[in-house]
Amino acid sequence: MKPFAFARPGSVAEAVRQVAAEPGAVFLGGGTNLVDHLKLGVATPELVVDVRRLTSREISDLPDGGLRLGAATTNSEVAADRRVRERYPVLAQALLAGATGQLRNLATTGGNPLQRTRCVYFQDVTTACNKREPGSGCSAVNGYTRYHAVLGVPSAMPDPTAPETCIATHPSDMAVALAALDAVVHVLGPAGERTIPFGELHRLPGDDPSRDTVLGHGELVTAIDLPPLPDGARSAYRKVRDRASYAFALVSVAAVVAGDSTSERTVRIALGGVAHKPWRAARAEELLRGTPLTEHAVGHAMGVELTTAQPQPGIDGGNGFKIPLATRTVVATLRDLTRET
Ligand code: SF4
């Protein structure tokens, strides 16, 4: 491990100042992802600034009926909170589908959505990776692609030598639920405070795969707000993975269904395991607005949503299976949510 300086400042503002002043500085929350990267040599910071004891560890009610999750609340605390379980079951279920109990006791609300891809090449410093080392290429193309993206990628088998190529997926379950809930991220940075709609926090690789989010250097997540859902709304998270525990999603679905009658019905669908960011299925949502959620209708809507999907070949058989799997997982999730109504 490369030596680094360690700081434990006395305030959030001081932590932001310290990181902003040092280009090689990073924040440390729960450390469940960063510490691995320090050991692997994936992250080589000059300075690590511990913010775990600085940001709020409270879950508080908002005047509009929503909830505010302090950035230092742990995944276990949020998943166990009665208000979260009753009002936002999709979030509690997503959290409990992630990692293990030990990791959830450390991982934080501020850090979980910022965890980095588990692309095996990103974590192997002997291989080319545009995300870890910009311009070096992408070893995943036609490699092990089972856990890689089918949405938001330009083609099946993009140019592995191009500096913009990256077919990684975002690994967080929590982030998929927050995308479906239209959460709002509070950030403090060197230029002050700002809020970011959760759907705009993560980005596609674009011309710079090294950047996972729109956060600037020195910007710290201080809280995440959950807006209230309409009365009677139901939500759920479903995750498909290679084993029952401690595995990342091949495909996951966070869904919210609202509306007393079919004509008033609205559906929110976010997909995990298929793109560089939690993928809001906006086209499918629009097609399903005010319609009966029959298997045929949902299948058709997802077929439209996935017309741009690009199955990636690979030495492990590729990931084309994700396209029908995504549709089936959405069908099953919405069927469960509407079964009792
Ligand atoms: Fe790196 Fe992205 Fe390619 Fe994986 S998919 S090797 S993270 S550039």
Image (cartoon, rainbow, N blue to C red):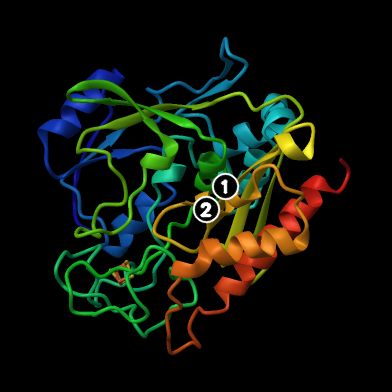
* Relative horizontal placement of residue 328, taking residue 316 as reference (left or right): right
The quadrant in which residue 118 appears is bottom left
Coordinates of residue 201 in the picture (x, y in percent): 36, 41
For residue 286, the mark is 1
Which amino acid, mark 2? Arg
Q: Give the quadrant of residue 41.
A: bottom left
Q: Amino acid at mark 1?
A: Glu
**Residue 276 coordinates in the image, percent (x, y):** 39, 59
Q: Quadrant of ligand 1?
A: bottom left
Q: Residues within 10 Å of mark 2 (few under 14, many from 20)?
A: some
**Are the two marked residues, 2 and 1, in contact with CB atoms closer than 8 angstroms?**
yes
Say the numbered circle drawn on residue 321: none
Q: Nearer the viewer, residue 129 or 158?
A: 158
Numbered badge on residue 283? 2
For the residue with label 1, is its CB less than 8 Å from the closest atom of ligand 1? no
Residue 242 drawn at (x, y percent)? 63, 72
Quadrant position of residue 1: bottom left
Image position of 142 with respect to 102: above or below: below
